[in-house]
Image (cartoon, helix red, strand yellow):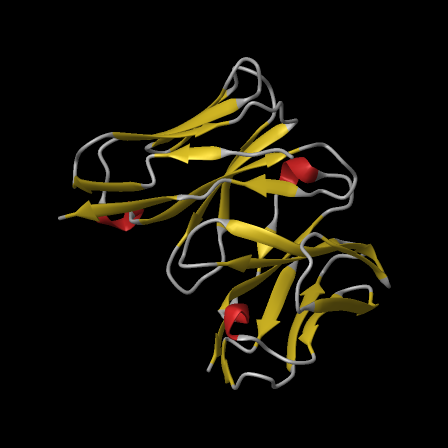
């Protein structure tokens, strides 16, 4: 069966520090991968999506970047965090071309920038 | 840009009551999905509807996709405290990238 792992679960980082959030998927190959941010427990904002290794698309200009060094690994990074980067970050995967099967989300990372 | 509007944003009801959450758009979607999310967790897929007019039932939950595939509703019969959570609708555009457009969510609180 397919599983998705996201870590860490919580993170408190000072302004100006770097960030690295990691997401890995098991039990499938060549998945679509996504990074979302959720503010105040409401709707999801798509940050990045990837359809393959080193193929990353950014949806919103911002202080963050994403990388996909391996087929089932997706990393969200920042060189210098801002207060506005605080939020709940979610990684998700879906089957290529099969949007009807929906997304499977990780358990999320609560990031607080202080 | 495709947008999905959910209503109401907040819903507070007593156990045993019925409720309906709406998800509306001016855009046509190839599929419409509903997710439920608990605090501190990722959303979990409840259902996907793909055909205009389609109705799906999941125990006490009934999901409907509009005939024109621009809107959807979620109806819960005899709500229970365990139904409490954030409900999100999401529309799929049918691209190979699989991008979904999410609504802003409905926070449901069911009181005992």
Question: On the rendered structure, is A68 left or right of B110?
Answer: right
Q: Report if residue B41 is visible in the image.
A: yes
In front of the other: B33 or A50: A50
Quarter of the image for residue A75 reads: bottom right
Question: On the rendered structure, is A108 left or right of B58?
Answer: right
Quarter of the image for residue B99 reads: top right
- Count of numbered circles on the image: 0
Residue visible at 57% across and 20% down in the picture: B69
Question: Where residue B30 sits: x, y (%)?
Answer: 66, 26
In front of the other: B1 or B34: B1
Question: On the rendered structure, is B11 left or right of B1?
Answer: left
Question: Where residue A78 sits: x, y (%)?
Answer: 67, 76
Q: Quadrant of the N terminus of chain B?
A: top right
Quarter of the image for residue B49 reads: top right
Q: Report if residue A74 is visible in the image.
A: no
Residue visible at 18% across and 40% down in the picture: B13
Question: Where residue A39 sits: x, y (%)?
Answer: 46, 59
Question: On the rendered structure, is B14 left or right of B32?
Answer: left
Q: Does B110 sit above or below residue B5?
A: below
Question: Where residue A44 sits: x, y (%)?
Answer: 53, 51
Q: Does B110 sit above or below residue A81?
A: above
């Amino acid at each position: 069966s397919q599983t998705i792992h996201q870590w860490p679960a919580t993170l408190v980082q000072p302004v100006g520090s770097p960030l690295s959030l990691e997401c890995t998927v098991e039990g499938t190959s060549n998945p679509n991968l996504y990074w979302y941010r959720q503010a105040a427990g409401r709707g999801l904002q798509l940050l990045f999506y990837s359809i393959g290794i080193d193929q990353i698309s950014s949806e919103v200009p911002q202080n963050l970047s994403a990388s996909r060094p391996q087929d089932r690994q997706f990393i969200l990074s920042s060189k210098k965090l801002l207060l506005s980067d605080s939020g709940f970050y979610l990684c998700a995967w879906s089957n290529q071309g099969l949007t009807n099967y929906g997304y499977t989300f990780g358990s999320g990372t609560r990031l607080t920038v202080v | 840009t495709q947008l999905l509007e959910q209503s109401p944003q907040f819903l507070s009801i007593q156990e045993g009551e019925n409720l309906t959450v709406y998800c509306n758009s001016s855009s046509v979607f190839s599929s419409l999905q509903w997710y439920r999310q608990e605090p501190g967790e990722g959303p979990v897929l409840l259902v996907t509807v793909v055909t205009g007019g389609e109705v799906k039932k999941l125990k006490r939950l009934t999901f409907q996709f509009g005939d024109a595939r621009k809107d959807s509703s979620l109806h819960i019969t005899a709500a229970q405290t365990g139904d409490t959570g954030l409900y999100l609708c999401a529309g799929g555009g049918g691209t190979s990238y699989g991008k979904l457009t999410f609504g802003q969510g409905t926070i449901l609180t069911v009181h005992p």
